[in-house]
Amino acid sequence: MGHLDGGHFCEELQNGVQLEDLKSLAMQDAVRVLLQGLGEDVTREGLRNTPLRVAKAFREGTRGYQQKAKDIIQGALFPEAGLDKSIGNAGGVGGLVVVRDLDLFSYCESCLLPFRVKCHVGYVPSGQRVVGLSKLSRVSEVFAKRLQEPQRLADEICSALQSGIKPSGVAILLQCSHLRFPSLESVLLDSNHEVWSETAVTSGTGIFKNVDSNSWGDLISLLKFRGFSIKKSPTTSDCWCPSQISPSPSAIACTTVGANLPMVSAVTKIIEVLGEDPSRKELLGTPARFVHWLMSFKNAKFNMKVNGMGFCKNKIDPLEADDREVIGTARQMHIELNLGFWSQCEHHLLPFHGTVHVGYIYPKGIHDPLPKPLLQSIVHFFGFKLQVQERLTRQIAETVSSLLGEDVMVVVEADHTCMISRGIEKFGSNTATVAVLGRFSTDPSARAKFFEGIPKGSGGR
Amino acid sequence: MGHLDGGHFCEELQNGVQLEDLKSLAMQDAVRVLLQGLGEDVTREGLRNTPLRVAKAFREGTRGYQQKAKDIIQGALFPEAGLDKSIGNAGGVGGLVVVRDLDLFSYCESCLLPFRVKCHVGYVPSGQRVVGLSKLSRVSEVFAKRLQEPQRLADEICSALQSGIKPSGVAILLQCSHLRFPSLESVLLDSNHEVWSETAVTSGTGIFKNVDSNSWGDLISLLKFRGFSIKKSPTTSDCWCPSQISPSPSAIACTTVGANLPMVSAVTKIIEVLGEDPSRKELLGTPARFVHWLMSFKNAKFNMKVNGMGFCKNKIDPLEADDREVIGTARQMHIELNLGFWSQCEHHLLPFHGTVHVGYIYPKGIHDPLPKPLLQSIVHFFGFKLQVQERLTRQIAETVSSLLGEDVMVVVEADHTCMISRGIEKFGSNTATVAVLGRFSTDPSARAKFFEGIPKGSGGR
């Protein structure tokens, strides 16, 4: 029996599925270390399956390590006759082919956050053969689904297509957007925090080797029909990832690594399990940067900081119920729109961000409306945590209600990174949640008045 | 040995993967019947793997038959406390949650073509529990990935979410767009052919049962922030699928079914293999409608028809090479923009459509520019076939060149149904192909002048 069992075990270990299971368990352990480092209770219901979900999301999001571009192109090259007696380029001999506006996302090798990619792929066939159009997208996906940096991503797609199709040339143009997740300090000081860091990169082979060539000129013309324009990147390509801009890597190393060595080791383990080499030059500082970012969601830290900003439940005396009735018609609706928020999804350890709209009815003449900076502080206080959007909405509503009476309505509109960077990949989706307290819960006309105050298109990205 | 082999065989048949293989083979046989019915050579290289690709695409696109919504929701319900002493609705007790702008596609049960769905899902939690946001998308996908009709799709999503989450109510709003693939006759007669048939449907349970309720009012308000507006549907929901409008089902039955009984049987077989009941009322006429549509791509038929429209290679005498040299500077560029085209991808038996721009240099004073209707006929002639975009581009360029000298440039911009309704699901992507003959292939300034003549945004959907 012992002998047979042993053999059985070995077989299972050699079997791909079983090995995957072991890798997933190693990642789940690492995620548990991170949650504990954040001071969270890993057994509470909302977090119980988070290690599994995070492990699954990371594996899905970096599945390109298990794929080969060659396998994808093979069998999708079709003979396509070239020109019949004419002089020029077309069909299988030199007519430019461009697939525009492929939506991808990739994982930033510098901070492990997903970034969005608008990918444009061009090539000029030769040897009387063309490639199935969907393969240009599939090959791009293989390299996007790894830990990347925009220029390397473009170069790897380009080189794989060149060697797989052997055309006259391949051109890749990527427009990349990286969430600029702020620190609590910076967002409190700068209300105009830029949401996105953007960069555009190109890569070319053969007739696209030189970006000033006429071939590139033709391709850019074809992109312009779709409204494409190259914006000047606000950051140089050396530090397009916000984690490399502020604070400095050395500051992170000093303040974070020592205190959080188990967390840093856990992230190193995750990178290794994904199939990457954590000692690769570009990945050396990644675990420390990720941990530094994650620690901004540590509960205790925020309590103190937001209190320091002057947020205090007793600053404004709540009205007594009797007062409210006496005031009657003097009560007036106030609406505060587009308060930015930043949060961390506790189910996936991925950011979500967006805007909060707050409406409340207050006794005009007796109290002033709440100062906007106070509302913004409340929003950040509940944002900078492991959260779910429904809870965030309720907490903001309850806090405003505790300050100025119970007639409060809150709408939160959010883009969830987990909705684009996991299996469902719903790039354009956006989630709205509502909390209605007091009169807003019983009076549809009050709700309607509030909704009318929100400008059309405010829920966009 | 015989005994062991037999057992082995049974085991394989019971194994899901092996059964899938048999189903795929049955579908591939059916697709071969369709290709032969179109008069195509199923052994030519471009078509050799089409049966496999079509079978795979159909299976992928209707994988919802193998999935259960219950399995998806299970394990993704999270306890979320409700309001703390206040009067109202928020968090786990009644705060509206809306996921907006989920891009889906589904297969039309009436004609087997994919249609696009912009899906909005709302629900109001109760019982102090909320569902993971991505599950709203995943459950919607389960029902979208079946043979559907908009209202049933909305009802099925709604009912599955209601029974899985048990909230106060679920609201589904779908905006559906169905390609109105024209017949060759209709597109030649009507140059303003509408590209899309659109409809909007709703479904609601609980507090969303009545579409005039305040709950629906709140939800519509939240959709309006994203630019949502309900357009009046140009068709009634009874016949939103163009295949049911023209020609009449009885006409199809008379003209097509008799002649193409093997093709109709093949489509019936495909529907059966997908896991559907071909004798379900709504599916009864589907095989005949699909075959009727497919037959518009039969080669021989178009040759005759387009010749009947006056398209003839010798209508305009091509210039001799000597003439062109003599004319010299009198030659002038003419650009014809936005010629609509409709075609059928020979790799996937799925439509692609878009616009063609043609530029050519002609001897002014000696010849007039080509009449636009003639160019449009040429485009339709090469469009209404089993095609690939690269070949279509070349064929148009060569034909124009044969009529009026060799300096011709053609740009084709296309949306490929296979890019949205197969594995990659790249909803916003668009493909451009270029052919350049004569002077256009050697003179970048001639190409640039042509590109400048194409209006920005022309490549949109």
Image (spheres, coloured by chain):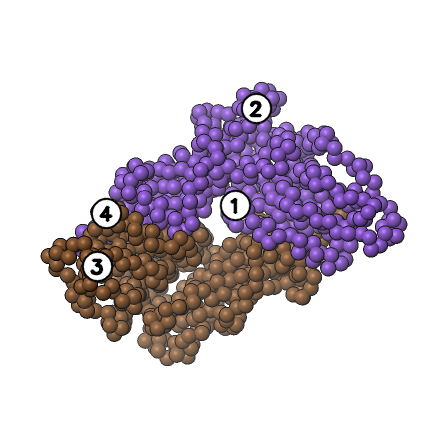
Chain colours: A purple, B brown
| Amino acid at dot 2 | Ile
Residue B31 pos. (x, y %): 34, 62
Q: Quadrant of residue B164?
A: bottom right
**Residues under labels 2 and 3: Cα distance?**
67 Å
Q: Are marks 1 and 4 in contact (CB under 8 Å)?
A: no
Quarter of the figure with residue A354: top right
Query: Which residue is drawn at the image coordinates 74% and 35% (left, top)?
Result: A311
Check residue B362 in the rendering and tell me which mark sits there, or answer none: 3
Q: Which residue is mark 2?
A: A252
- Tell me whether marks 1 and 4 sit on the same chain: no
Q: Looking at the image, do the residues carrying marks 4 and 2 touch, with CB atoms under 8 Å apart?
A: no
Image position of B172 (left or right of A156): right
Cα separation, mark 3 vs mark 4, equals 16 Å
Of callouts 3 and 4, which one flags the residue occurring earlier in the amino acid sequence? 3
**Residue B205 location in percent, x, y?**
66, 62
- Measuring 46% from the left and 69% from the top, which residue is drawn there? B241
Cα–Cα span, label 1 and label 3? 50 Å
Label 4 marks a residue whose chain is: B
The amino acid type of the residue labelled 1 equals: Ile
